[in-house]
Amino acid sequence: MMKQKLALGLLASAFLAASTAFAATPSFDSITTTLKANMMHPLMDITVINASSNTINLYLPNNNRPINIMTGAYQHIYSDDPYLITLPIKLTNVYNQSIYEYSVCREAIITVYNNVITTDNDLCN
């Protein structure tokens, strides 16, 4: 009787582990640059700050059209997908040359200066 309960418990935990491993599929469809009304505090809030003297372009994985960030402006990237831990970000200059292409954590702050780009991941820890 005890062996049957132990075997049943092990079988149930194996099914639970397998179902959660295969269910955790992140989706880029949930990425937006507009804070939705149902997002009190979104799970992802990446900020890109343009402190350079030129406009930069932001490319997101779910959109081939660039988002222009003017000099002195910033852009937030939101998502409420709990499985989206990092996000690939691509930034280009006014000549569409890639200046930054990395995956960043869900609370990263990217600051673009004229010759330097910094990524602050302190909020992710």
Image (spheres, helix red, strand yellow):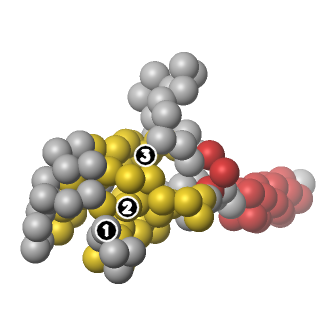
Residue beneath disc 1? 94
Residue beneath disc 2? 57
Q: Residue at x 48, y 59 (%)?
A: 66
Please name which of the two marks, 1 or 3, marks the residue nearer to the observer.
1
Q: Nearer the viewer, residue 7 or 40?
A: 40
Disc 1 or 3, which lies upstream in sequence? 3
Q: Quadrant of the N terminus?
A: bottom right
Residue 81 seen: yes
Q: Residue at x 54, y 19 (%)?
A: 37
On residue 77, which mark appears?
A: 3
On residue 50, which mark appears?
A: none
Query: Which kind of residue does numbered mark 1 sit on?
Result: Val
Please name which of the two marks, 2 or 3, marks the residue nearer to the observer.
2
Q: Nearer the viewer, residue 73 or 15?
A: 73
Instruction: Rate crowding at label 2 as few (under 14), some (14 to 19) or many (20 or more) other CA atoms within 10 Å.
Output: many
Q: Position of residue 106 (x, y in %)?
A: 39, 52
Query: Which kind of residue does numbered mark 3 sit on?
Result: Ile
Q: Position of residue 43 (x, y in %)?
A: 46, 40
Q: Nearer the viewer, residue 80 or 7?
A: 80
- Is residue 82 depicted above or below 101 in this figure? above
Query: Which kind of residue does numbered mark 2 sit on?
Result: Asn
- Is residue 14 depicted above or below 76 in this figure? below
